[in-house]
Amino acid sequence: MSTEEKLVLALDVADCDYAVELIETFSSHIEIFKVGLELHTRAGSKIIDEIHRRGKKVFLDLKFHDIPTTVAKAGVAAARQGVFMFNVHASGGLDMMMKCRTTW
């Protein structure tokens, strides 16, 4: 694992333009950028595309927690967007986590 992959920069901002500015500023040192709920709600897949356009990886931090099938389908949608990783909230239960892991 490279030094650039050992750090994840959290884009915990609401403004897409500012997030892009942060990506541009730190891209030479950071490989993975975290997109959380606030930024994703404001910018949607646009911010994921901006990160990918620079050849970087996305950690989609939306803490999926819902009906097992819904979480599984959200996981597939995230994977199809090319995110490097995403998370599920463990309090959703084993069935939800297993469904998400095995659905493709």
Image (tube, rainbow, N blue to C red):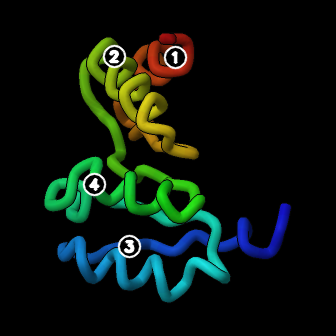
Q: What distance separates the C-alpha of mark 3 from that of mark 4?
A: 14 Å
Circle 2 SS class: helix
- Which residue position is annotated with label 3? 11
Label 4 near label 3: C-beta < 8 Å?
Answer: no
Q: What distance separates the C-alpha of mark 1 from that of mark 3?
A: 29 Å
Q: Picture quarter containing residue 11?
A: bottom left
Q: Residue at (72%, 66%) from the top-left corner? A: 5
- Discs 1/3, front: 3
Q: Is residue 53 left or right of residue 63?
A: right
- Which residue position is annotated with label 2? 68
Label 3 near label 1: C-beta < 8 Å?
Answer: no
Q: Give the camera-side residue of 97 and 30.
A: 30
Q: What distance separates the C-alpha of mark 4 from that of mark 1?
A: 29 Å
Circle 3 SS class: loop
- Which residue position is annotated with label 1? 98
Q: Give the camera-side residue of 69 and 18.
A: 18
Neighbor class of circle 2 (other Cα within 10 Å; few <14, some 14-19, many 20+) is some
Specify the quadrant that holds the N terminus: bottom right
- Which residue position is annotated with label 4? 46
Neighbor class of circle 4 (other Cα within 10 Å; few <14, some 14-19, many 20+) is few
